Amino acid sequence: MLYNLVDFNDLTITEWEELCELAFDILSNPEKYSEKCKGKILAALFYEPSTRTKFSFQTAMIKLGGSVIGFSGTEEISVSKGESLKDTIKIVSNYADVTVIRHEKEGVAFAASLYSDIPVINAGDGGHLHPTQTMTDLFAIKKLKGRVTNLNIGICGDLLYGRTVHSLLKALSLYSENNFYFISTPELSVPEYFTHELKKGNTIKICNIIEECIENLDIIYMTRIQKERFASDEEYERQKSVYILDKEKLEKAKSDLTILHPLPRNDEIATEVDDDARAQYFKQAELGLYIRMALLIKLLENTSRISVATSPATVNSNKKCKNDKCVTKVETGLPNINNGIVCSYCETLL
């Protein structure tokens, strides 16, 4: 049974289908679940800014009858005094029943899960993963398209640093018979690691511009160019406005195209598109509430703690992570459980 959600692929297909079924029932019968988590407390630990993810988790817990504690930023908490992640998580475990964490360092959610005595949900760890956004994306696709296979899916923008893209691709690797169109500059192309499994049973095409493939697409998933992920302002300025979806480009698209975006957006989707019936990104964000409600219910039903740190699947290794954004660069005393191929925390090739 699921205890933590660090990576969407922590879920089996069966568990994911059960979550979807539950989310659809919550959507149709919200009153049935108004006290489902009564007496339970969610700790929302947001080291990085968030609007949709933070508010949807808070709203989800409140709609389920529970309560919320937590913080945004680190100025008013003991992290500003040098407190380690381990100590923060150990203390929070005493006060809450489930934790959701967002952090700029990659692998923080997995590290937190090793320390925590309560379930941990990854709300985004640097440019690595964002599994509950993936749940939102897949639930939206299932709701709006009625299927998650046999689709032409275009993914556009920041495919290198975008954690929503990485999580979505890992999840879609569980399915087959989809055609993927990666639309980006060469500098922001998707890492090979995230496409390896996707190639089994699916096709991948590389596109330089939106116009090259938009007429074929059933879904276009737009992403913003993330300034916070770039090493310099100069590099960000060179990339930020390369791809913009507007009415002119949509003239070539299918009448039943679905336009998605994890949000927030900058200028990659022109505001004139908002009134197009194909624009579904605000509905996508709304649907995220119900799948997160389902996730909280399922995690709080399971009380059997699993120690990932001592799992037989993990192997000791002396190899060190080379990713400067990895949690291992800032958190001392982490278990060394690399498999000798990739970092267990951020999945960077060793």
Image (spheres, rainbow, N blue to C red):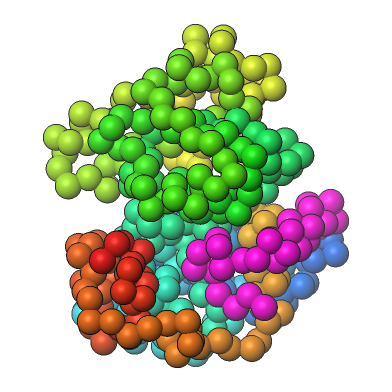
Q: Does residue 177 appear left or right of residue 127 in this picture?
A: right
In the rendered image, residue 288, in percent from the top left (x then y), is placed at 62, 51
Q: Does residue 310 appear left or right of residue 174 in this picture?
A: left
- Specify the quadrant that holds the N terminus: bottom right
In the rendered image, residue 124, in percent from the top left (x then y), is placed at 43, 59
Quarter assignment of residue 5? bottom right
In the rendered image, residue 251, in percent from the top left (x then y), is placed at 56, 9
Indicate whether 16 appears above or below 115: above
The answer to whether residue 32 shows anywhere in this view is yes
In the rendered image, residue 61, in percent from the top left (x then y), is placed at 64, 67
Q: Residue at x 64, y 17 (%)?
A: 254
Q: Does residue 293 appear left or right of residue 225 in this picture?
A: right
The answer to whether residue 168 shows anywhere in this view is no
Give the residues in magenta: 1-30
Quarter assignment of residue 21? bottom right
Indicate whether 107 appears above or below 159: below
Q: Main secondary structure of the magenta part?
A: helix
Q: Residue at x 33, y 38 (%)?
A: 189
Q: Residue at x 65, y 87 (%)?
A: 303
Q: Nearer the viewer, residue 154 or 286?
A: 154
Indicate whether 259 appears above or below 163: above
Q: Nearer the viewer, residue 197 or 253?
A: 197
**Residue 16 belongs to magenta span:** yes
- Specify the quadrant that holds the C terminus: bottom left
Q: Nearer the viewer, residue 272 or 78?
A: 272
